[in-house]
Amino acid sequence: MNMKKRTASIPITTAALIVAVLALATSTVYFAYQGRTGNSISSNTSKTLSDPYFYKLSPVVSGAEAQTGDSLSTADSITVSGTGGVTYTPNEALVSASVVKSSTTAEEATSSNAAATLDVIKALNGIGISNSSIETQGYTLSTDYADCYSSCIPQITGYTVTNSLQVNITSASPSQLGLEAGRVIDTTVAAGANQISLTFSETNSILTELINGALQQAVASAYGQAQVMASSLGVNITGVLSASEGSSYTPYYGSQIVYAAALNTVSTPILPGTQSMSVSVQVVYAIS
C-alpha cells in the first residue's frame, strides 16, 4: 500500500502576515541623523527604539537658518521693541460748525436748516474764509418721537436736520492760530451754528517729518536695547533679520466742544498748546 505524503498548505495571505510580524519583532530602525557639527550618521547604521538619538530633533531658534553642503548652521537672534515720540505745536485748527434745526415736518426742518447753513457760509466768507477751506462734514435728517413706554405706539413729533461744516485754518503762529479759531467760532455761532467742535492737527508735509523723526528714535531705542542684551549674554550683533512697525502713530489732538445757546459779546479764547505722537518698532537682530 502506497502512502502518499501529505503536505499542509498555508494560504499566501497568512504567510505574509506571519512574515510581517516576525520582521516587526526583530527589525531595527535605520535613519540618518545630522548633527550641528555637520557629521552625519550613515543611513545603514542601526538604531533601535531605545536609542536616545531616535527622538532627537535639531534645535529650533528664532532667526534665519541656512544650509551649506552637509552642514546646517543656525543663526540665533534677539528680538526687541523700541518706541519713539515727538511733541509739537500744531499749525492747523479744524472747526466743525453744525446747524441743527427741528420742525413738525421734514420739509420745514430741511428748508430752515438750509437757510441757516447758507448764512453761516456767507458769514465765513465775510471774514476771509474761502469756500476752499470749508467742506460739508456730515448731514442728517432724523425723526423725533414722543416718549413711549410699555406697549404704546411711538408717535412722531417732528424732524431734526443737522448740517455740519468743517472749517480748516492754518497758521505757523500758535497765538494767531488760536485767534483765528476763536473768530471762526464766534462768527459761525452769530450766523446760526448751534453746535461747535474744535480739534488741532498738523499739515500733511510737517506730519510726515514728525513721523519719520519718531521712527528714527524708535529704531535707535531698539538698537540700544539689543546692544545691552547682547553684551549681557556675551554675544555679538551681526545684522538685522527683520524690522517692522509695531503700531501706527497716535497723535493726540486737543478737542473742545461748545454748545452755543446765545451769542457772547466776548471773543472766544483758544489756546492750541502742544500735541504729541508716538510710534513703536520691532527689530530682530542676528547674533553670534
Image: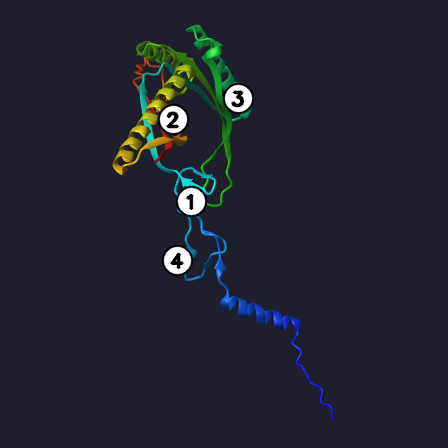
Whether residues under marks 3 and 1 lie with C-beta atoms below 8 angstroms apart, the answer is: no
Which x, y percent locates residue 254? 33, 22
| Residue at 32% from the left image edge and 29% from the top image edge | 223
Q: Secondary structure at mark 4?
A: helix
Question: Which residue carries the number 1 mark?
Answer: 38
Amino acid under disc 3: Thr
* Image quadrant occupied by the N terminus: bottom right
Question: Which residue carries the number 4 mark?
Answer: 52
- The colour scheme used to paint the residues is rainbow
Which mark sits nearer the N-terminus, 1 or 4? Answer: 1
Amino acid under disc 2: Tyr
Question: Which residue carries the number 2 mark?
Answer: 249
Amino acid under disc 1: Gly
| Residue at 48% from the left image edge and 55% from the top image edge | 31
* Image quadrant occupied by the C terminus: top left
Which x, y percent locates residue 138? 49, 23
Whether residues under marks 1 and 4 lie with C-beta atoms below 8 angstroms apart, the answer is: no
Which mark sits nearer the N-terminus, 2 or 1? Answer: 1
Furthest residue to the front? 2
The Cα–Cα distance between marks 4 and 3, rounded to whole angstroms, is 84 Å
The Cα–Cα distance between marks 2 and 4, rounded to whole angstroms, is 52 Å
The Cα–Cα distance between marks 2 and 1, rounded to whole angstroms, is 47 Å
Whether residues under marks 4 and 3 lie with C-beta atoms below 8 angstroms apart, the answer is: no
The Cα–Cα distance between marks 3 and 1, rounded to whole angstroms, is 82 Å
